[in-house]
Image (tube, coloured by chain):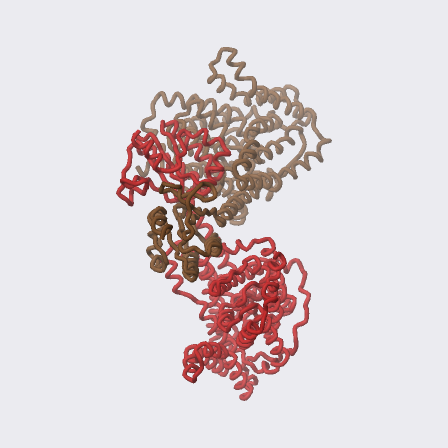
Chain colours: A brown, B red
């Protein structure tokens, strides 16, 4: 059991049979065809040579297959992780320089290491602090930045930078240098991809394919577009005219690489590696859980940390760049029938074949075509309606989302995430520091008590029932004192205050001192303090102190008992 | 009303009469006698010339009298604020250098400015994030550091430094250089002060004074001890033997000083000024509220921010050092009968007289005697039993307290506070991210439902009542999904899950998405999701979404209604 937990492949491998093999194989073929142009394009996005994309699609897939718990997740180069890699390294090094490439390797190894450690120490819950609105805002903003970063490749001008302002300025500055042959290839690829996305499935269905097969076959569109663009470039010798191409790519498999162990570099890249790891993990988990639920399976978050960490360690030691699960690729893998993580291992074999035999074909591949595949692929990341939905439901969540988007676009991906997380936490603390309170009355003829402002209820002059809708802790301890004493100050005929506590889940040491102060001050004014509906765990803690002895009133199991005893007295 | 709120003196000044004047005057005399040696000693502690202590006891007292709401608070040089001043400035400048003195002025002005701004923008609630255990631990540790910092003066050796390790090393290293005449004066002063604290009141009562008058008269002990020590030093010409004395102090009043406006200096001192201000505010508030409650008065926290800020601005423009309310002095002020902030203004007049006429007497005042008064005075700050109490009640609070103490002692006062606050927040978030949950059953024959593990209750095979004891937000959204789906997975005969929600005070956007996911996944498994006892504000928010339409089950006003409908079905 224990070793199976740590090596989930031991759960499915013994029961592996011919049918599973067949469906895994089909999925692997479809995903391989999709992954070849994607891995090259994301390497371009990350600012490393194209072959790094292929190298990052072999060992990581195999390692995820061994350690992962989701059959559908496709862990290899991904859009957001590649953007974050570029953003982190561009601040420190010249793109493409040996230091830059060494940095990409350290980023992979370090984020892998951090993920494995988080998994071993069961720190997966830390990822929960990336709230849905922050993640959603961050992914949308990343989509915009990624698309913008590819516009330069598409029109043949230089436009480095890691935020929207920097890139926008450069693009506008270089606009007069547009390289028309590059632009022609780029726009043609873009149009072809958009057309394929819209019209290919209906066309294939019209040709007699079933809808599912048509959907899967349509996933080959990027590889076809890239192949046609390469053919056109080669036929017209456009590289000679100045169209940027991938160029000579070494054929063969990655060799094992020892990452730089320079402490200064590790320190500089620590935060970026942590964020790449955590963001990748959060995305993997949400993709994995969505798909697992459809098949009534469960995935184990702590084991997923280990698996994603192992995949990144594999990418680093292959001399490549950080990897993560891609939503689009995982969805295709799932739809194509991937039943076990073996599908990923078969995909890795497909990429090995590509690295061995296809690399000569890449020489004349125009970068503009790869840029077009990226732009079309990330367009699905941008979810603007989420902003509206969040605004309607919660202003606080909207604020965190907006801050994440604006800082990601305007400053950097790291600043965006950190601002979103900090603001989410700050707003949560702010809300809990000024909790909702309600004075209660009795719903006539029942044992139920409701807010006097919302319901027609009975009240008593000599009794105040005050419900506090929050755990009591340091941030609201003083607010509590002020609320209770104000209530007592406003009602001179008051004899008893009952704090109705079903919503109080904790009372920390600061709040306990405040309760003692409230009890003493009410006693000075001849008002007794009572508690009702105190939760079991909270009561257990209070019993360890002398507060219950010092309490001027009683502790009632139900508010109704308090009402019966105190309202009429 | 509005101007009275901003200038609280307009509330009491129109009703000021002879009786109030008399009791304020008595309090002022007692406090002046206490403040003279204190202000000199705290200047020594802060590392500035002795007269700065007097200068910081004039304008600040007057300004607090105009803007403050508490009649008892004595805002002038205080132990913890002086320690924090020394700690901040020793890191940057040589003690006593012109830069150091300019830094003290900037610290006062900056902390005053920040406090006034916090008051104007009603940010007083920010101080709540300094929890009681953190404050208590910080004050205890500060007491230890202050006492240790005075040991050098007491035995006549050099021992600078701002944490226990640094000072301890220096003291041990210089132990062979003990200056015996200094040690004799120091130890004699210390013993005299301890004896006075223990025996003076009973002795005065035996001589026929009333207990209250005896208590107040005993407050003159430090001034007597200091006077005797000065006399002895002068008579024996001990300054010539190498006993450190205060030396020439310029006679007269402080002149208005323009603080340095160098941006670099302001930036370097920003954090220290903020912490001095906030810690001073938290102490002022707790002292002020304790005393106000005894007289059935209220104090206004936001106005107290403005008043303490004005006092610090006054200290800065007097060319002196940061000020705060001192607990011991405020208690004496209160006991001596101070009725209005005018008592502070009269005290300021007393200090003006001292600055004009007493300074020649300070020339031969031995620093060892001042150090003795500090040591005796801060001994009451150290509250070790609080550690034990906190450990018994809450491990999390204890951890925050211990971290504060250890870092304050071992590193610096700033590190101590920041670690304590961060750890308190982190532990609160951690606890709320793994909330307590309970499966409920019906208390037989009633409409009440209790935890099946704690009570003998009725349950139903087809119905699960799950109470979540926490607001639902991003940090526990995933935990919630796992808990509910695990429950459903364990009980195959389950038809209905009721989430019992009286403890749920908020549902943020992340948690709403999780609820939608739970609803969908339970529906896939033919289990309906219901809610009961949803709070009004939470329900209002849910109504703005389509969640209630998508919910597979119902929303019940009470859990009993859910039980009646679903348990028997």
Rendered view: B79 above or below A567: below
Q: Residue furthest bottom?
A: B235
Where residue A6 sits, quadrant-wise, is top left
Numbered circles on residues, count: 0
Image height check: is A162 above or below B419? Answer: above
- Residue B412 visible in the displayed image: no
Q: Nearer the viewer, residue B101 or B225?
A: B225
Residue A478 in the figure: left or right of residue B264 = left
Measured along the vertical axis of the image, is residue A64 above or below residue B312?
above
Q: Where is residue B17 shown, x and y percent of the image?
A: 58, 71
Q: Quadrant of the N terminus of chain A?
A: top left
Instruction: Determine the residue located farthest toward the right in the rendered image.
Output: A176
| Residue B529 figure quarter | top left
Q: Position of residue B421 (x, y in %)?
A: 48, 55
Counting from the top left corner in percent of width and height, residue A522 is at 43, 59
With B257 as the anchor, is A253 left or right in this view?
Answer: left
Question: Residue B31 location, x and y as percent?
Answer: 53, 74
Is residue B267 visible in the rendered structure shown here? yes
């Amino acid at each position: 059991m224990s070793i199976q937990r740590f090596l989930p492949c031991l759960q499915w491998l013994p029961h592996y049979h011919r049918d599973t093999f067949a469906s895994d194989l089909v999925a692997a073929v479809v995903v391989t065809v999709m992954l070849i142009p994607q891995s090259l394009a994301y390497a371009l996005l990350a600012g490393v040579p194209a072959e790094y994309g292929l190298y990052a699609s072999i060992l990581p897939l195999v390692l995820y297959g061994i350690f992962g718990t989701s059959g559908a997740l496709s862990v290899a180069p991904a859009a957001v992780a590649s953007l974050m890699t570029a953003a982190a390294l561009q601040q420190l090094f010249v793109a493409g320089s040996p230091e830059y490439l060494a940095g990409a390797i350290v980023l992979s190894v370090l984020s892998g290491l951090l993920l494995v450690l988080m998994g071993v120490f069961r720190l997966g819950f830390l990822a929960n602090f990336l709230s849905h609105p922050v993640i959603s805002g961050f992914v949308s903003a990343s989509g915009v930045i990624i698309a913008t970063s590819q516009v330069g490749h598409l029109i043949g001008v230089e436009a480095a930078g890691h935020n929207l302002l920097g890139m926008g300025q450069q693009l506008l500055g270089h606009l007069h240098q547009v390289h028309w042959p590059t632009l022609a290839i780029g726009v043609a690829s873009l149009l072809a991809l958009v057309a394929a996305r819209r019209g290919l499935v209906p066309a294939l269905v019209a040709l007699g394919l079933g809808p599912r097969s048509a959907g899967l076959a349509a996933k080959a569109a990027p590889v076809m577009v890239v192949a046609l663009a390469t053919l056109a470039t080669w036929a017209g010798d456009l590289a000679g005219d100045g169209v940027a191409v991938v160029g000579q790519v070494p054929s063969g498999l990655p060799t094992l690489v020892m990452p730089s162990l320079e402490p200064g570099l590790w320190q500089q890249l620590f935060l970026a590696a942590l964020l790449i790891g955590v963001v990748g993990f959060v995305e993997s988990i949400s993709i994995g859980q969505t798909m697992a639920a459809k098949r009534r399976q469960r995935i184990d978050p702590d084991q997923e940390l280990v698996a994603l960490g192992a995949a990144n360690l594999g990418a680093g030691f292959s001399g490549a760049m950080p990897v993560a699960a891609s939503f689009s690729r995982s969805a295709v893998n799932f739809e194509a029938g991937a039943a076990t993580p073996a599908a990923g291992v078969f995909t890795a074999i497909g990429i090995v074949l590509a690295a061995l035999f296809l690399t000569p074909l890449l020489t004349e591949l125009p970068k503009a075509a790869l840029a077009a595949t990226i732009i079309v692929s990330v367009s699905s990341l941008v979810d603007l309606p989420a902003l509206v939905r969040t605004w309607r439901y919660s202003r606080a969540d909207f604020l965190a989302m907006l801050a994440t988007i604006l800082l990601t676009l305007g400053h950097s991906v790291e600043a965006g995430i950190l601002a979103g997380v900090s603001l989410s936490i700050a707003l949560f603390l702010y809300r809990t520091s000024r909790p909702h309170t309600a004075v209660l009355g009795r719903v006539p003829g029942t044992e139920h008590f409701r807010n006097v402002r919302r319901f027609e209820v009975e009240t008593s002059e000599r009794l105040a029932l005050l419900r506090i809708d929050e755990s009591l802790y340091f941030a609201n301890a003083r607010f509590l004192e002020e609320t209770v004493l104000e209530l007592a100050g406003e009602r001179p005929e008051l004899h008893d205050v009952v704090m109705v506590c079903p919503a109080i889940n904790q009372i920390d040491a600061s709040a306990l001192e405040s309760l003692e102060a409230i009890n003493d001050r009410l006693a000075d004014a001849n008002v007794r303090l009572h508690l009702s509906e105190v939760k079991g765990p909270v009561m257990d803690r209070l019993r360890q102190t002398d507060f219950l002895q010092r309490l001027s009133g009683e502790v009632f199991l139900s508010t109704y008992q308090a009402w019966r005893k105190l309202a009429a007295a």
